[in-house]
Amino acid sequence: MKTIGIIGGGQLGRMLAMAAARLSIRTVILEPDPHCPAAQVANGHIVAGYDDDRALGELASHCDVITYEFENVPEKSAARLAAERPVYPPARALSISQDRLTEKSFLNDCGIPTAGFHAVDSRADLDAALQLFGGRGVLKTRRFGYDGKGQWVFTGAGDDAGAAFEALGGAPAIFEEWIDFACEISVIAARGMDGSVVSFDPAENEHSGGILRVSRVPARVSGDVIEKAKIAAEKLLSALEYVGVAGLELFVARDGRLLANEFAPRVHNSGHWSEAACVTSQFEQHIRAVCGLPLIDPARHSDCVMYNIIGDDMDDIPRYMMMPGALVHLYGKAETRPGRKMGHVTVLSPR
Ligand code: ATP
Ligand code: MG
Ligand code: MG
């Protein structure tokens, strides 16, 4: 029986472990929190930091292949593991996606357009960027930002560049052109060891406070946009010689441009609906890919809307439990906190 090592033990690791179990594949997680969501379902748990050399050695010794559930896995740890076992997705995808500047440059090099951007290595660079983009845009930390953290929006009126620069901890940062978008979409795609790429239908995503709230499939965009988004994902995964599932986030701009925002080299929150609306979920596709199993066309049998259950949204769970066509999925987190992702619900409308 095969064993997969998963770096990280959050809800994504938990759902990967659940999908693996269904295929009789074992999972061992590496995660410092003994009470993490994945610990409740994985077969083994090494309680240690992601850069603990002894723990990394132990993980490699227990597993046939290693994967991860978050993009900030230390590069050194990925390299250390790759010396002993196959690590998928490849370390290059990690290092590119960990830095917004490298990421946007790489997307452009692949022929995938993004918002205009300018590297901010100093206060003077920020002033130059503001000049370049007419004072409107978003200043973002280059590394470690998620759920909209480490960002400052410039509206073009009365913005305090000094305060923004300081609030983000200075350089290195990136300034991005402000995109007036009609909607945001994402493509969850999988690439197998044979180089084949299969994509789920793009989801239309609503964020508030920087956090994903709702994903809707099908996205309310033209067939042309859907096709272009899938082609962009395929280009990206092929250029990375990727193995596994990735999420590519895109803006559908009001001026007609389709622009990539960022990609995640892992399963993605905006793909959780796939467990309810498709014959195979993003989690199973990822497990299949990293184990060299065939990827299948993840044909969608239902339209659906996925709602993230964040913080006090937990109060809505009794209502969802009674709703026909609603698949409730909770992550086993004991404590509810504001902004904390507790679960998600996918409401199906069969096609
Ligand atoms: P995630 O949790 O998805 O990793 P993140 O912290 O990496 O988020 P982004 O995805 O870059 O950040 O931005 C969060 C949200 O902020 C986007 O989904 C979008 O709604 C808005 N946003 C980001 N960049 C821009 C932009 N250049 N123009 C307009 N809106 C933007
Ligand atoms: Mg991000
Ligand atoms: Mg994002």
Image (tube, rainbow, N blue to C red):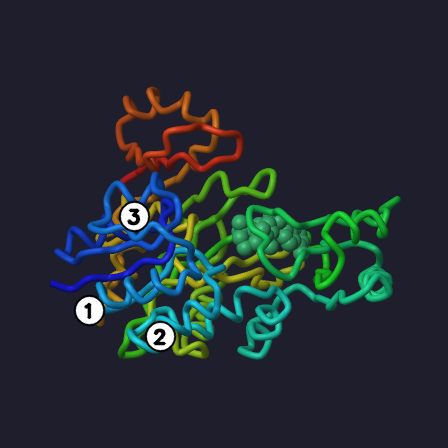
- Asked if the residues shown at circle 1 and circle 3 are in contact, with their CB atoms under 8 angstroms apart, the answer is no
Residue at the farthest front position: 54
Left or right of residue 27, residue 108 in this image: right
Residue that appears at 31% across and 78% down: 195
Compared to 23, does 205 lie above or below? Answer: above
Among numbered discs 2 and 1, the one appearing first in the sequence: 2
Callout 1: few (<14), some (14-19), or many (20+) C-alpha neighbours within 10 Å?
A: some
Image point (46%, 75%), residue name? 92
Q: CA distance from mark 1 to mark 3?
A: 18 Å
Q: Is mark 2 within 8 Å of ligand 2?
A: no
For this rendering, which residue is in front, 324 or 101? Answer: 101
Image position of 277 (left or right of 256) = left
In the structure shown, which secondary structural element does the residue marked by tag 1 occupy? Answer: loop
| Mark 1 residue type | Leu
Query: Residue 118's x, y, as percent?
Result: 74, 67
**Residue under pointer 2:** 82
Q: Quadrant of the N terminus?
A: bottom left
Q: Residues within 10 Å of mark 3 (few under 14, many from 20)?
A: many
Count the marks: how many?
3
Measured in 3D between alpha carbons, the distance from the residue under mark 2 to the one under mark 1, in whole angstroms, is 20 Å
Which residue bears the numbered disc 1?
Answer: 293
Image quarter in which the C terminus is found:
top left
Q: Mark 1: is the Cβ under 8 angstroms from ligand 1?
A: no
Q: Residue 139, image x and y in percent?
A: 73, 55
Instruction: List the residue tagged with mark 3.
Output: 15
